[in-house]
Structures are given as structure tokens and as C-alpha cells.
Amino acid sequence: MRRLGLIGCGRIGRVHALSISRNPDCTLSKVYDPSLANASQIADRDGATVAASADELIRSSDVDAVIIASPTNMHKEHFLAAARAGKPIYGEKPIDVDLERAAATILELRREGIPIMLGLNRRYDRDHATLRSELHAGSIGRVQSMQLASRGPDSAPTPEYIRSSGGFYRDKCVHFLDLIRWISGDEAVEIAAMGSVVADPHVGEHGDIDTAAIIVRLKSGALAHIDNARRATHGYDDRIEVFGTGGMIESSRLRRGNVTRIIGTSMQLDGLTQTPFERYGETYAAALGAFLDLIEGKPGQYPTMEDGFIAQAMAEAAILSAEQGRTVKLADITDRFRSGADAILS
Amino acid sequence: MRRLGLIGCGRIGRVHALSISRNPDCTLSKVYDPSLANASQIADRDGATVAASADELIRSSDVDAVIIASPTNMHKEHFLAAARAGKPIYGEKPIDVDLERAAATILELRREGIPIMLGLNRRYDRDHATLRSELHAGSIGRVQSMQLASRGPDSAPTPEYIRSSGGFYRDKCVHFLDLIRWISGDEAVEIAAMGSVVADPHVGEHGDIDTAAIIVRLKSGALAHIDNARRATHGYDDRIEVFGTGGMIESSRLRRGNVTRIIGTSMQLDGLTQTPFERYGETYAAALGAFLDLIEGKPGQYPTMEDGFIAQAMAEAAILSAEQGRTVKLADITDRFRSGADAILS
Amino acid sequence: MRRLGLIGCGRIGRVHALSISRNPDCTLSKVYDPSLANASQIADRDGATVAASADELIRSSDVDAVIIASPTNMHKEHFLAAARAGKPIYGEKPIDVDLERAAATILELRREGIPIMLGLNRRYDRDHATLRSELHAGSIGRVQSMQLASRGPDSAPTPEYIRSSGGFYRDKCVHFLDLIRWISGDEAVEIAAMGSVVADPHVGEHGDIDTAAIIVRLKSGALAHIDNARRATHGYDDRIEVFGTGGMIESSRLRRGNVTRIIGTSMQLDGLTQTPFERYGETYAAALGAFLDLIEGKPGQYPTMEDGFIAQAMAEAAILSAEQGRTVKLADITDRFRSGADAILS
Amino acid sequence: MRRLGLIGCGRIGRVHALSISRNPDCTLSKVYDPSLANASQIADRDGATVAASADELIRSSDVDAVIIASPTNMHKEHFLAAARAGKPIYGEKPIDVDLERAAATILELRREGIPIMLGLNRRYDRDHATLRSELHAGSIGRVQSMQLASRGPDSAPTPEYIRSSGGFYRDKCVHFLDLIRWISGDEAVEIAAMGSVVADPHVGEHGDIDTAAIIVRLKSGALAHIDNARRATHGYDDRIEVFGTGGMIESSRLRRGNVTRIIGTSMQLDGLTQTPFERYGETYAAALGAFLDLIEGKPGQYPTMEDGFIAQAMAEAAILSAEQGRTVKLADITDRFRSGADAILS
């Protein structure tokens, strides 16, 4: 029974607490959040105690491993503190929105040698995982093209959120850039991107976009499309399709029910789930299970810091492409992290 | 926070315990099962104590209300004991497989005047409930015909199970006979049925059937079909369709995932969930929530003992029809329960 | 190049003319209809000549074979005249609405020894045929139950139509009673039926029903459901499902397009085709092709007069069951046609 | 009754002949093909006469309008000859694979002032047209992104075909570049493209690609994806999706039947149609009908030479983008055709 400490009791922290409460192999022993109210709410419900600081939580003898769900700008500090205390970490991405600082932090974290798993939770979507495992089993031959569409949910980002998230490519597209690698088992070679403001002028006023189109060439020659939008009025619209030399496979949109009506000349099915949590809520539980396996030393494909780093680098390449109107080779971004004492990528 | 006692810690009892553990408005305080191992397993996990007998559990001051999940032949005794102790009851159907004894027991239970809810859990299926509420809202006009198909899961019943369950009509079809009433809001007038042994000869050797076809005429003139089979090798195949004067509405089969492949000349979707619990597991949680509402005195449509009784009577009519090769009027079964001191049905 | 004569230039006659005009292996040489306008309309478009009478058409040396699409009460006369003239016949069902007269006519027609094919055109539906051939190939094991639903189109029958058609069981249900035999490759043993008037009171006022529920036991023990309604406001709603010991197979509703929208919380697909001809129009062309094969003497499974007769007998059994409130053995209807000089059924 | 002449009796010419034979408002009077056998085959079946040359056909007094289905490198000559003879033209695209020559030819053709319709037949797909008309009616708000996927059929192009077609962007992608404009009602601003050889090395050996990924920015800011592949082993896989500020709408893949099986843990639907003609065959008939309307002077949105020219220019921009690794502004290609005496685009 692993005793877990949770740093950050906001929206995503509450999701982790729920997963912990339903997992028979771990308990939530300590929580910390700058807001005592947030921390107490979880602690009271789940029988945990509230730590006075992240540091106190990390050093507590009641905490075997740490879940880091703090604001992005605190990730680096919390990752490093937990690693130095020898506590295994399951932390939200990114380690740092700045690629250089992320690289430097990864090097430091590596030196501590403790198990670290990055919260690339979409990898734990049941249907995405089915798609990937069948693809890797050869069911549709070699990958020829991929489509990753994700739009929604229906909520406008605040100016603060736009700023702290690093913008749409770094915040949302990065998930799908990671999924391209994870699903294909291949690496990106070059990237072309266009961004646009179509639905939410205020997003543009704050220097961001609400619509992104990205194409990625992989080493094998396969070409992947990302079609991402910040908002969708018709629910949380997520779809991944892989077309191969032997067929196609799709992880389809998730509908919120299974009722069909035929009335007049129309057939009406239940529409999409409305929030990402309806689709991806279960991935947090699955990812938690994987983290417990990682602590146990079980072999497996855990999302690494390096996975997070490469996805970030791909997002930077997309940003560069959109800004400069050219196809950007990923190597232009990553070459300086490939060799020498500071090699993140081998 | 209601403290619940659970009588019966077998397969269905464990489902109730799980629902209780996930419901923030109740706790499991006491459990009882003739098998101490079964009882302890649940008690240990959920922080309950084990009672030495059903009676001890029922009389315990730690128990505000009782969940009865004991074997069918014990239902009558446990319902009566709990009612006499003044404890609200959420109990599995039927109160007794024998219609006369069930009627007599209902009369006794009524005299105690405590809240009783029968476990007609399929009424709490999300999609069935959507279908019903849209139908009642008039979305497809008046009901003209209904189809209720249910086949599976893929497991052969033991001879003991066949015997104690009262046979296929009383055990499985009864759920769908109830759903006809609940969904349509209408009452059965007459019933014709055929039973057959197609897939499992051993079911026939024990005097039961594995395939039932039932048609029911409702007061409104609407005609309902039940197409039930004990086993299905392709999963748990459950579907309800209502055809009305203004369209049709269907609560569709439940598929176990949302991955689509197109390979060669075939499009392959994920198939059905394999067990009833994958479909109906959530209904137990919803039914528990309804039971807590009932205890609170909140108005609502709770499945009553009388609902269970009428469904049983419909099953008896189906059995009679199949045996005698004639259309049976439900009144032939129920008239003697309609008036006088022993009136179950008004 | 077969030269065909068409008797009857009404709605169904026009469908046959269209099939002929598109079939490269035959031409329409002569047409006849009591309405010269009807006959001329087809003749002018398709380069045929108008015969002054059915007899003239049948005896014409330009006519190699005869399509009979006259009113039902003329079928017997036209079948006999064509058979006596030695002309192969493709004729609409039934040979006579009266079972005795139909039997007598079949015996007479048999004596002429010419090829006769009955227009049981639903057997030529592409999807129904796929279902049947896969079923017969063993894809889902042995048949356990069947569902045949057909509702629509959205048009009220005239009193004249109700009278001349022989009523709903004989007019519509008979198609699905035939499909049960054709799809299953099995024979009916007993039938229970209920009829109702739900949507169209005027149908009831003319002594007919608008909703039928029929269950049929087959020799193998399989049980089949027919759920038929005269009208459907949501299009022409036709569906056949077979459940077997190894899975299920369905010939699904036919939708009129392949556009999907997700708007708000609803997913909206194109609804059903609105008329039987949108679904079954193509079956006439396929049946015509089969008829040309029959004339050529090619082996095949052509719908016979006896097929039509058995379906009629099943409809009579359903009518008897509904009237008398009992399960009717098909043998009660057909035994007198089974032996001796007048044996229709061997 | 329009009398049509058909130049070119190959694969596509035969499709046009079939459409003409089924259209009651026109007849095929004359055909020409360098292969007398090809020409005679159609002429014999459809009652047309064979012309000794394209010129003879064009000048024939039996020919009211001309269908040009000759090889691409003959289009220019045949368009000009027909236009000079004052005969309305329905001609296959492109007018010339070379953009300059196409522009010059368009200017010449314009001077003749006769009705000309270009064979952008995918615009006549029933489902694509439904999507477009609902989109233009405002059903999903403003366009935010589009996805146009088309892969297949399963046939390898010959080296000759690769050469004469101008390559994959000019041959296949051009259809979808046109559909972007037609569906959105918007114009392209810039284009980024990547091409790849994944499935068919021999395509690469002949200097072409088998996989293309294109993104297009429209004036409104909307971003469109094209995902095209030459071959697909799973059928002809065509899909268009538009995501808007008020929902999404899709013209889905076309399946070849409506049979569903559930066997074991898999649900198996009929797969895709196997050839483009199964999907787009009907569009030729619809386009022919439009052409007859155009001759009549009926107002409508007929695909113009300029439409074809812009789609070609978009394909050239995609080729340039893929070659040079940069986002190409469409104006870089088209500016020289925008003004002065040689203005193709106003």
C-alpha cells in the first residue's frame, strides 16, 4: 500500500485524489496547496492530512511518492525537491515551459536516479491504447498517414491561462504531438504549421490562436495531421485515425449515451461528451496504476521526461513554422540537446 | 449519512457494497452472510463489521436501513424481519417465487408501513431511462410497438440455478416484462408466449428453456415483443426499441469500446460488453441513490413490491400461454388479487 | 434478347418497365392496361406497342414471356391464360387471395409445365441476401431467434385498398412470413399473433389492423418475431435480425444519405429512405434478371408458386390465431393440401 | 431533346455514354475515338454513329453539344475546336496540365462566348452537396477547420499514367483543392504541403508521390487539411468534415452494404465501396443534368474553367511548397493572371 502525497489541490489535483481513493493499492496520506481551503476539502474527504508546505509534504515519512499537480511555473521546483528527497514522482507536464530550462532540469533530475513518470495521460485512453496496440501488432500494415483531431471543450480561456500555458501549441497541440510519436512508434523529421483565430477574437487579442493545423513528416515517410481547436460548441470532439498500407483504424469520438431516435427525416444519436474529463477522466486512474507499477520496478512503457521534452520541442518547431512560413526540421530545434554532457536525446 | 446493513455477500452483495463505498451519502456498517469468508472480505475492505446473523444485523442500532441480497428463498423472511424492525428495505426481487406467497408477504409488509424499494435495477440504466423520459415527453407520439431483446451472457446455468430461479420466464423475462410497463407507462392486457431449447440441450433436460418469444398487448393497443435468450456467444446483447406514431427510439446495444477498423472489405467495430455487469453495474449505484432518496421521503418513482408482483404475474401468464398454446389474459392471473382484504392490485 | 409483355401498367407495372429498359438482355415489346393512357405512357417511352387486351398481348408472337402486374383479383385469370399460351410468367403475388382458389390454380398451372416465378421481390434485397448467404454459410451457427420489423411508408390505405388486399396480414405480413422461411431455410410449425389498431382509427373502421405482432416457431425450435405496422412517420423502417448460437447478423435500416452532423448535444444522421421503392426498387431489377435466368433454364432458387402459397397459409394461421386467441399449428391450415391428387405441398 | 457528341470512348467516355442513355432529355448521336473498336462498342449499344474524326463529330449537324473525354493532352485542341464551332462543351479537367497554356486557352475559349462546363464531378456527390448546402445555410456557424481525406482505390498507376497525369498533386489532390473552395465558399490564401512515398516505391521511382498532406489557409482564417493517398487496400476511402463555430458536419465514407454482424468480441459492418465509380458514378449523371440546364440557360452554379484553373494553381502552390519547404502564398502563383488583357482572375 503506497502512501502518496499530492502537491496541488486544484482542478487536476482533485482528479488525482479521486483516482487514489478508488485505487486499492495506494492511499492519499498528505496534501498541500497554497489554498488551505482547497487542501482541506480533499484531505477531509479522503482521510489525508494537510501539509504546511510542499517541502514538508515531500519530506514527510508518511509519503512514499509524490504527485505533482501544482501550477506549471512551480513544476521545476517541486520535481527537483521530490527527486532530491528520493521520492518517486508522477508529475504533470511540462517540467518547464522553456525548453532550455526543461532540458537543464531533466539533467538534474536524472542525476537523482529516482523513478519519474510524466503525466502524458492521453496515452492511457482505452481506445487510443487499443488503436496503438493493434497498429503495432501489424493489423493495418505500415503507417501512411495519421489524423489527430481535438476540439473543445466549450469554454473560453482566461487571459491569465493563455499567458501561463505558453499558448495553444505548447498547451494543447503538445498532447497530440506526443501521441503521434507514441502511436506510430516513429520520430518526427519536419513540421509545418498554420495557426489562426476564427472563433474567439479575444484569444487573438492576447497573442494566441484558437485553431491550429500542423503536418508532421515522420522518419518512415508517414505524414501526420493535427487539427486542434480551443473550443467546440458541440462537445469534446477527439478523434485519432491511422491510415496504413493494409487498412485504417480509428479511435472514434466518444458519445455520451447510446440512444438513437429516428424522427421525421432525421436519425438522432446522443452527441459527444461535453468535457475532456468525461473522455480522459479514466486515463488518470490508469496512469496512476502505471505509476504504482513503475515504483514497483515493473517493466513497461512509462511516459518519460524525455518524451515530454520531445513533444515540447515539436511544439516549438510548429510555432517556428507558423511564424516563419516554412517547414521546420525538428533537428534544428533539438540538435543542441543531442550530444555532450548535456545530451537529453541520444 | 445513512448506515446500511447488507444481508448476503455473494456476487450481487459485492456489487451493492461497491456502490455503497462510492456513495458519499451512506456507509456500510454491518454485513451478514452464512459464509463468514464472504462477509469478512467485504467487511475488511469497507470498514464494516460482521454480524452473526441476519437478525442481529437487522436489529443493530448501527443499521439505519437494510439491503437484502440473500438467496431468493430467504427473501421473504429477511424482508419481513427488517420491516418488523422498522428498517427501510432495498431488496432484490422477487419477494417469493410463488405468486400466492409473494402476495401474502406483500400484505404483511404493507402493514409495517416502512419504505420498501424493490431491486428492479434495469429501470436505472442510463440509456433505458433516457428512452423512457423522451417517450413520456411525447417525442415519438403514442406507442405502437416495442421490442425488448436481451441475450447473454455467455455462461451456462447450473441445474441448481435453473431450479432455484424458477425457470427462464421467472428469472430473466420478468425483467423485461417489468420494463414494458415502466417504459410504456401502460398495463398488460394479454400475453402469448413460446419457449424453446435451441442452444443448450442440458437446459431442456432440467425442464427449462433457453429461448423465449413473448408478445404482450397493452391497454392502449400497443404490442410489445420480448426476445430473450439465456446465452449469447457474442456478448451481452441488450436492446430496447419503441416504435410510435411519431417515430422510433432505441436504447442500443452497449459496445465495449470505440475503435473502428476498415480492413479489406470489412469495417470492424469493438463488439459488445461481455457481461451484464458491464452494462448494468452502474444501475446498482443509481438505484442505491434512489433508495437513499426514498428513505429521505423524497417524491419519486421507486420500484415497488407491487411492480415486482405484476411482473411476476406477467411471467406466470407467459408460462401458462406457452404451456397451453393460447393467449392468456393477465386478468386470469391477477383477478383474485384485485379486491377484498387481500387486494394487492387496486 | 427476350421480348417481354407487361400486363398492368399501374404503379408496379411502371417499376417493371423501368427494370426492363435498363436490362440489356430483354426488351419490352407489348403492354396492356385497361387504361389506355397508362399503357401508352409506358409504350411511348420504351418503344413498345399497346395491346388491345391481355389475351392479345399473351398470344402475340412478339412476346416471349409475360410479366403480370395486374390487380390481384385478375392474377388467376392472367396466370392461367399465359400458361396455356406456353409463355413463361413472372407474376405478382398472390395467385389468389383465397387459399383454396390459389391451390386449385397452382394445380392447373403446374399441368402446363411452363416456368413460373412469383414476385417475392424482397428476397432480392441486396442486404437481406447477404444476411441469408452468410447465415447459410454458418457464420453465426444455428438460428435461435429472428426479428423482422417493417413499418411504413407514411401513407394511409384507402378503404378499397384494404378490401382488395385481403387485410394487413395477407398484404404486408405475408412478405415477412415468406422471408422467415427463405432466410432460415426452415419451416414454420406454429404461429401466434396479435393485431391492433393504434395509429389509424379508419383502418379499424374498415375491419383491418395497423399493427401486427406475430411469433413463429420453426421446426428447428428457433422462434421468429414479426413486428409490422402499416405506417411510419419516420420513413420506411425495415430491419431483419437473426440471432444464432454463434453470434448475430442484421440487415439494417436503409438510410437515405451519409451525412453526419454534431450540433449542440445531438449527433444527427440522415434518416431513413421514405418509400419502399427506395429500398426495394432495386429488387425488381434483380428479380427480373433471375426470371431471365429461369427462362434460360439456369439452375437457381426462384420463388415458386408454392413459396407464395405457404406464406399465404402462414398469414391465414396468423389471422386465425389473432381471432381465436390461440397458438395455431400451421398443419391445421395446410394438411388438406398435403396429399392426394390435389397435393400442393409434398 | 439534346443530341450529344462524345469525344473519347475510353473508361470515362463510357461513363458519360451510360449517363446519356439514362437521361430522358438527351441522346447520344455521335461518338469518336482513335480506337474504332472503343467507339463502335458505345455506338452500337446506344444507337449512335461513329465519326471519322473529332472534327467531323464537332461539325456534325446531328450534334448540339460536345462531351470531351479525350486524353488530357488533347483537351486544349478539342475544347477550342468545339468552341469555335459554337457547340456548348462539357469537358473533363484540366484544360491543360500547364498553367500558362491553360490560361491562354481559357482566354481564347472565352472569346467564343459559348457555354462551357468543366467536369469537376465530385461537386455533384449527393452527400458532399448536402454538407455544402447545410453549411451555407448556417447550420454549423462559420468554418473553423476542414478535413478532406481520400485514399484509394487499390490499383497501382502505370508509369505512363503518372507522367501524363502531371503527378499526384495535379491529378488527385486538385479535386480536393477545388472542393475546399466549393464547400467553404472561400478562397485560399496560402498553402503548405508535404509529399511522401510510403506504399508504392515504384511511384517514387517515377518521380511522383503516393501520399500527400496539404494545409490551406482560407481568407476567413479557416484552415483546411487534405490527406490524400493513391492507393488504399481497404476500398475507396473518401471523407469530408467541416468543423465550425456551431458544430461539425461530415460527408462520411460510403459503405457498400448495410449488414451488421456481431461475432465473438467484434462487430463487423460491410466495408467501403471498392472503386471511385461506386461512389462517384452517380455524380456524372448529375453533372450531365446540370450541363443540360446550362445549355438551356438556366441559372446555377456550374463548375467553370476558372474554377478548374484556380484548383490547378493551388496544386502548383502545393508542389512548390513541398519542393521548397515553405508556405506558399497562392498570390505568388496567380498574381500574373489577375489583371490586364490576360486576366483570368478578376
Image (cartoon, coloured by chain):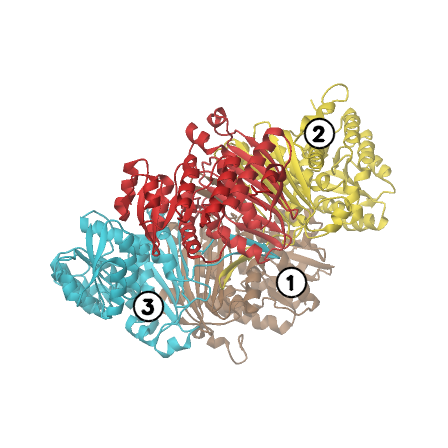
Chain colours: A brown, B yellow, C red, D cyan
Do callouts 2 and 1 mark residues in contact (Cβ within 8 Å)?
no
Give the residue displayed 32% in from the left and 61% down from the top: D175
**Discs 3 and 2 share one subunit:** no
Q: Quadrant of residue D109?
A: bottom left
Residue D3 relative to residue C11: left or right: left
Eye-nearest disc, 3 or 2: 2
Determine crowd level at label 3: few under 14, some 14-19, many 20+ residues with C-alpha closer than 10 A: many
Residue A167 visible at all: no
Residue A103 relative to residue D164: left or right: right
Tell which of B102 and A142 is nearer to you. Answer: B102
Residue A127 position (above or below residue A332)? above
Tell which of B103 and D256 is nearer to you. Answer: D256
Disc number for residue A290: 1
Q: Which residue position is annotated with label 3?
A: D169
Q: Which residue position is annotated with label 2?
A: B306
Residue C257 position (above or below residue A89)? above
Tell me which amino acid carries mark 3: Tyr
Q: Quadrant of residue C148?
A: top right
Determine crowd level at label 2: few under 14, some 14-19, many 20+ residues with C-alpha closer than 10 A: some
Disc number for residue D161: none
Residue D332 position (above or below residue D241)? below
